Image (cartoon, grey):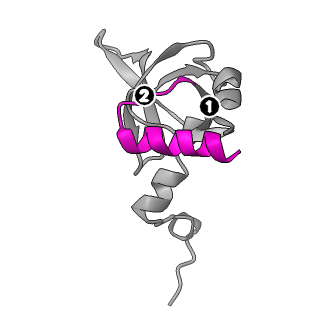
């Protein structure tokens, strides 16, 4: 038996690895020429700049990557709540541009260097 409710039909149940690989953001022009890549997976610690939406122009480090919601949070991009506290805004990775990569992970650094050599 199939459901007739569109809400139930639209749910996406992709694997974690597929979600992680789709969490990509474009690189800045200098990083693009340096690594010969157009996009890269967004990781916690990368410095990004918001290029679209209500928070356009804000810059900061990625403080969280939520693969289940397909969103990221950026330090300094907050929404004020009614009680006066700030709540971090969840952004799509495609709405930001990576300006500085966090190369503390040895595997990530080697893969980026390998892509630079191959092209």
**CA distance separating discs 2 and 1:** 19 Å
Q: Is residue 33 magenta?
A: no
Q: Say which of 2 and 109 sits in front.
A: 109
Element under disc 1: helix
Q: Say which of 34 and 77 sits in front.
A: 34
Res 88 → quadrant: top left
Q: Is residue 41 left or right of residue 87?
A: right
Q: Is residue 48 left or right of residue 94?
A: left
Q: Residue at x 40, y 45 (%)?
A: 107
- Tell me residue 79's x, y (percent): 43, 17
- Tell me residue 7's x, y (percent): 54, 63
Rate crowding at label 1 as few (under 14), some (14 to 19) or many (20 or more) other CA atoms within 10 Å. Answer: some
Q: Residue at x 71, y 28 (%)?
A: 33
Marks 1 and 2: in contact by CB < 8 Å? Answer: no
In the depicted structure, whether residue 44 falls above or below residue 10? above
In the depicted structure, whether residue 23 falls above or below residue 72? below
Q: Residue furthest bottom?
A: 1
Q: Residue at x 54, y 40 (%)?
A: 112
Element under disc 2: loop
Mark toward the start of the polypeptide (2 vs 1) = 1
Q: Is residue 56 left or right of residue 89?
A: right
Res 97 → quadrant: top right
- Tell me residue 103's x, y (percent): 42, 30
Point out the stretch of residues depicted in magenta: 99-119
Q: Say which of 88 and 118 sits in front.
A: 118
- Tell me residue 104's x, y (percent): 35, 31
User: Label 2 belongs to which residue?
Assistant: 102
Q: Say which of 75 and 98 sits in front.
A: 98
Q: Residue furthest front?
A: 117
Residue 95 is labelled as 1
Q: Nearer the viewer, mark 2 or mark 1?
A: 2
């Amino acid at each position: 038996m199939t459901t007739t409710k569109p809400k139930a039909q639209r749910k996406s149940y992709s694997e974690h690895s597929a979600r992680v690989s789709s969490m990509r953001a474009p690189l800045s022009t200098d990083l693009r020429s340096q690594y010969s890549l157009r996009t890269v997976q967004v990781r916690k610690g990368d410095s990004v700049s918001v290029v679209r939406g209500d928070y356009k122009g804000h810059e900061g480090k990625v403080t969280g990557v939520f693969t289940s919601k397909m969103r990221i949070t950026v330090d300094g991009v907050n929404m004020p709540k009614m009680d006066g506290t700030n709540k971090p805004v969840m952004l799509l990775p495609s709405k930001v541009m990576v300006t500085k990569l966090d190369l503390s992970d040895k595997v990530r650094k080697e893969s980026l260097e390998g892509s630079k050599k191959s092209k």
